[in-house]
Amino acid sequence: MFSANFGVILEIEREEMERKSLGNTYLFHALNIAENKEKYDTEVKKILSDKGILSWILKYTVEEFKETELSRIKDCIEGEPEIMAVSIYPGEKISGSPAITGLKNEDAVPNEGKIVYDIRFYALTPNEKRIKLIINIEAQKNYYPGYDLVTRAIFYCARMLSAQLDTEFTAEHYDQIKKVYSIWICMDSPSYAENTITEYKIEQNNLYGEFGKQSRYDLLSAVMIYLSKTDSSGGSLLHQLLSVLLTSQISVKEKVEILSNKYGLEMTEKIEEGVKKMCNLSDLIEEQAIEQGLKKGLQQGLQQGLQQGLQQGLQQGLQQGLQQGLERGIQAMILDNLEEGFPAEKIIKKLQKCFAIEEEMAWKYFNYFSDQK
């Protein structure tokens, strides 16, 4: 009995040495997950920058395009939208180009730091005046990153206005300033915000008397698009399109068919390749999170079990450690998947598959650990 237990201890110590020799294994997995999440975010931005998809966004969020056909809106988008592009200081001229041309996705104002826009581009209004607009699109997963997102959207608008000095207008010609839009697509929305579109802009308010002249104050607009985490068929057609595009619950083939047949999107190489990469990265992130949760839970459980085993008997301690490790692995999977926004039914199926437990027991674990979240 003693020799068998001693062999188990040696095996655990050997595994611990291997883990240390590889560095922090769990940190390695966490970094891998973070890296793939960053790649996923990049693919989302690439897909959203497709002119066909931008046309849908503009039609439902930009007043100037509300009554315009999608095909016409697409033609109003100038050049190729920039994604996380090169830095330029407000007022700095681009080498070899007139000051009025050139739109970059990073603003750096002295003493104010810099911000990088997800997507930014010019669009010309479809009317006879052909007024130029500057439009920014932001994809945001976290609804509340520690502050009200609307304040950040307003700030982005303000920066896009101030950054135009000496590039779009000069101090002698403020009338040449271009109207700006900052449009935010929020994927992890609370129930009270789901399937809504809200605009924040400047409006005239006569505090005393009636001002008889039309002033040009309508220069910025922040628009928040809130998607539903569970109901991809609700809301406007734009909500439904974006939900199909960004969900991880639909296969690549299904997405392509829906986007093409229902929404009339031209399946460009950018969209098809982006959808495929997004789906693959989503699956990879999920698998890595499950693997990390299992390893972390089993390791913690074994460590606790070993400590208890020294006091109560190695065999009993190891059994308890394995059970605790199993439960911690289950807990990690449930909490990670809830954080990623997966529905309860899918999490239950994963628990049954990964841990070989019955559906009833899976629900008991789910209800217990989700209440502790």
Image: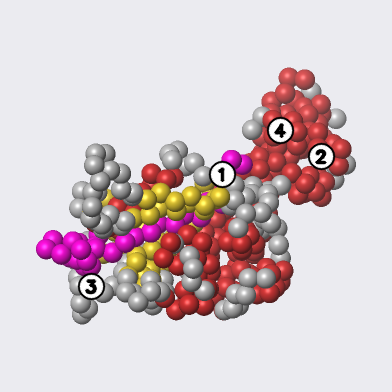
Distance of mark 2 from mark 1, alpha carbons? 30 Å
User: Quick check: marks 2 and 1 in contact, CB under 8 Å?
Assistant: no
Dot 4, how many residues are within 10 Å of its Cα: few (below 14), some (14-19), or many (20+)?
A: some
The quadrant holding residue 126 is: bottom left
Q: Amino acid at mark 4?
A: Phe
Mark 4 vs 1, N-terminal side: 1
Q: Amino acid at mark 1?
A: Ala
User: Quick check: marks 4 and 1 in contact, CB under 8 Å?
Assistant: no
Q: Residue at x 34, y 60 (%)?
A: 180
Residue occupied by mark 3: 100
Quadrant housing the C terminus: top right
Does the magenta run of residues contain 128? no
Distance of mark 2 from mark 3, alpha carbons? 61 Å
- Regarding residue 23, the answer to whether it shows in the image is no
Image location of residue 287, percent across then percent down: 68, 54
Q: Residue at x 77, y 46 (%)?
A: 345
Mark 2 vs 4, N-terminal side: 2
Viewed as shown, does residue 339 lie left or right of 148? right
User: Quick check: marks 2 and 4 in contact, CB under 8 Å?
Assistant: no
Q: Which of these two is toward me, 273 or 80?
A: 80
User: Quick check: marks 3 and 4 in contact, CB under 8 Å?
Assistant: no
Residue occupied by mark 1: 193
Quadrant housing the N terminus: top right
Task: Identify the disc placed on residue 362.
Answer: 2
Dot 3, how many residues are within 10 Å of its Cα: few (below 14), some (14-19), or many (20+)?
A: some
Distance of mark 3 from mark 4, alpha carbons? 57 Å
Distance of mark 4 from mark 1, alpha carbons? 26 Å
Mark 3 vs 1, N-terminal side: 3
Q: In this rendering, which labeled residue sits more in front, label 3 or label 4?
A: 3
Q: Amino acid at mark 3?
A: Ile
Distance of mark 3 from mark 1, alpha carbons? 39 Å
Residue occupied by mark 4: 369
